[in-house]
Each structure stands twice: as C-alpha cells, then as structure tokens.
Image (tube, rainbow, N blue to C red):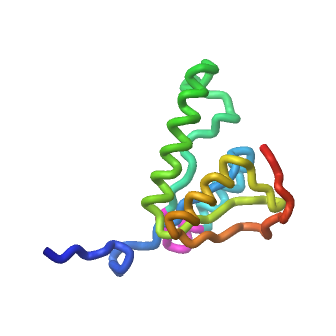
C-alpha cells in the first residue's frame, strides 16, 4: 500500500508552529497574522498563563495545566513542517529553549523573528 507523505502534498499549505514566551503574547499574535497572511497554517500557544483566567486561577490547577501545555506544544512541533521562534530582543526562555532543542532533535527547520542573542538568558 502506497502512503503519500503530506509534506509533499501540494494541496496542503506549510504548517508552522510558533514558539516563544507568552510574555510576548502580542508579538506571537502578530507573527500568527503574518504567517497566516503568507498562506501558512499556524499552530501557536493557546493559553497565556501570565494573564488571569478562571481555567488556571487555582495554583495547583495552573501547575498541572502548564505540564499539559508543555507536552501539547511538543506535539504541535511534531505536526509542524517548521518552527518560528518569536524572540524579541533575542530573548529565549527555558521553555522555548527546550522546544528548540526538541525541534532540532526531530529535524524541523527553525526560523527566528529576531537575531539570536549569544547570551544564555534564563526565565
């Protein structure tokens, strides 16, 4: 049985996943708009735990949700054809760095919105 790989299918646009700190929620939304306008399917963080919301107002619930979201984002990387790191000022936090490392391991091409700072920022 012949399996057609979706990567080479002309009927499907490129899928790009946005990675970056939710402190840059506005910049993530902006990147989403530009990538979508360029005809790409965009996968992005769906929850900003830095903004108040009933879903994660309880600290224990917020901790559990963070684990779920971190894993979910790796699965989004699995689905994507490429990764776009939203890194204003060159900032890349620990979670984003883990996602970049994962994307490298699974062979996804990675683009950055800003030049990458050589410094090892934490946060």
Image quadrant holding the C terminus, namely top right
Question: What is the number of callouts on the image?
Answer: 0
Left or right for 4, reference 85: left
Residue 53, above or below 92: above
Q: Is residue 85 magenta?
A: no
Q: At 56% from the left edge and 43% from the top edge, which residue is drawn?
A: 70
The answer to which quarter of the image holds residue 97 is bottom right
Residue occupying the far right of the picture? 119
The image shows residue 77 at horizontal and vertical percentages of 50, 58
Residue 113, above or below 22: below
The image shows residue 56 at horizontal and vertical percentages of 59, 26
Of residues 74 and 44, which is closer to you in this image?
74
Residue occupying the far left of the picture? 1
The image shows residue 34 at horizontal and vertical percentages of 62, 67
Q: At 47% from the left edge and 69% from the top edge, which residue is drawn?
A: 81
Give the magenta-colored segment's residue range.
35-41
Image quadrant holding the N terminus, namely bottom left
Residue 85, above or below 123: below
Q: At 36% from the left edge and 80% from the top edge, which residue is drawn?
A: 8
The image shows residue 41 at horizontal and vertical percentages of 47, 65
Q: Is residue 36 magenta?
A: yes
Residue 37, above or below 120: below
Q: At 52% from the left edge and 70% from the top edge, which residue is drawn?
A: 107
The answer to which quarter of the image holds residue 112 is bottom right
């Amino acid at each position: 049985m012949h399996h057609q790989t979706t990567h080479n299918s002309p009927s499907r646009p490129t899928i790009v996943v946005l990675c970056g700190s939710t402190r840059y929620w506005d910049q993530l939304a902006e990147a989403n708009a530009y990538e979508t306008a360029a005809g790409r399917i965009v996968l992005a963080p769906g929850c900003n735990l830095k903004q108040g919301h009933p879903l994660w107002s309880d600290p224990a619930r917020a901790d559990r949700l963070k684990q779920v979201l971190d894993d979910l984002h790796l699965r989004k990387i699995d689905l994507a054809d490429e990764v776009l790191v939203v890194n204003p000022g060159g900032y890349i936090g620990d979670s984003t760095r883990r996602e970049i490392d994962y994307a490298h391991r699974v062979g996804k091409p990675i683009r950055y919105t800003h030049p990458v700072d050589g410094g090892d920022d934490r946060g």
